Amino acid sequence: MTASPDFSRKQLRLAEKNPHRRRRAQRPLPVTRRPARRMKVSVRKQVSSAVALAFAALLAVSVSLPALAVNPYAQTLAAPTERNDEAVQNLTTSESGTITVAQDSFTSQAIQETLRTEDSLPGVYSQTANTYTNDLGSAIQWPFLVGVPISTDFGPRIPPCDGCSSFHKGLDMNPGVNTPIQAVADGVVREVSSTDKSGLGVYAIIDHMIDGRLVSSLYAHMGEGTLALAVGDPVLVGQLVGNVGNTGQSTGPHLHFEILLDGDIPTDPYAWLTDKVSTS
């Protein structure tokens, strides 16, 4: 907008009379500018505030929701399954005493957690196979929770080492070194060795009373320091016996497992367990 000529001349005359007014008259009119930088800063602050509010809301939701809603892979270990029966069995120990063992069938919590935990000992269940299907609710079970490779069956064989027998009295099972071994049935520990001095290495023999008959299970070549039983201990099915090792007359880490009828007559463990686990 431009001022009229008469108004400008009047201002100049007044300025000549008054020097102070002259300086003000000669001062240029201020140019109005938009505060662009201030507007940019203001917009930036608004955006930052909105992001902060959104992050706070997301944090509040993630804290309030259950773990499975945020991480679908977060799981809690299931409690071991248990089954209580009213029946009991009486077993005679080597000292001619009698121990009553309740028919309480369960799966050892320690074994289940070892199987499911990612940071378990190296080698634990490093090998599995469809050699059999275990029944964790059965009164008689396989010595491992799941099927594992079987490298040597029951019966005649070519001796794998000097001093090894030509007739194999059990099964050689290969789930991997350190894998926990579980008792196949309720019973009482008859015999153990915690040293590597015998051909069986670290081993345990458990006596069971099954269908009115004495049946013994033998677990050999276990790792030193892993034997979890002592002579005379009552044992429940699924209870920890020891861990797979390579002690005694052994060519590699494995469990040598036997079933002994009447306490000393070897029978095919695979056929016996296949029949008993499916019908017990």
Image (spheres, grey):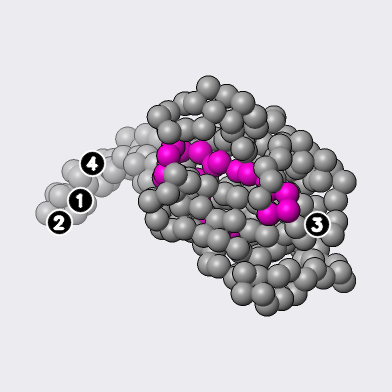
Would you say the residues marked 4 and 3 are in contact, meaning their CB atoms lie under 8 Å apart? no
Q: Nearer the viewer, mark 2 or mark 4?
A: 4
Would you say the residues marked 2 and 3 are in contact, meaning their CB atoms lie under 8 Å apart? no
Which corner quadrant of the image does residue 20 belong to? Answer: bottom left
What residue is pinned by disc 3? 213
Q: Residues within 10 Å of mark 1 (few under 14, many from 20)?
A: few
Helix or strand or loop: what does disc 2 sit on? Answer: helix
Q: Residues within 10 Å of mark 2 (few under 14, many from 20)?
A: few
Give residue 21's position: percent from left, percent from top: 19, 54
What residue is pinned by disc 2? 20
Q: Residue at x 57, y 49 (%)?
A: 219
Whichever of labels 1 and 3 marks the residue nearer the N terminus, that label is 1
Whichever of labels 2 and 4 marks the residue nearer the N terminus, that label is 2
Whichever of labels 2 and 3 marks the residue nearer the N terminus, that label is 2
Which of the labelled discs sits on residue 186, or is there none?
none
Left or right for 86, reference 39: right
Q: Give the magenta range.
A: 240-263
What residue is pinned by disc 4? 28
Q: Quadrant of the N terminus?
A: top left
Q: Residue at x 51, y 60 (%)?
A: 192
What residue is pinned by disc 1? 24
Q: Nearer the viewer, mark 2 or mark 3?
A: 3
Would you say the residues marked 1 and 2 are in contact, meaning their CB atoms lie under 8 Å apart? yes
Helix or strand or loop: what does disc 1 sit on? Answer: helix
Q: Residue at x 65, y 55 (%)?
A: 183
Quote the CA–CA distance across marks 4 and 1.
8 Å
Callout 2 amino acid: His
Quote the CA–CA distance across marks 2 and 3.
129 Å
- Magenta region includes residue 27: no
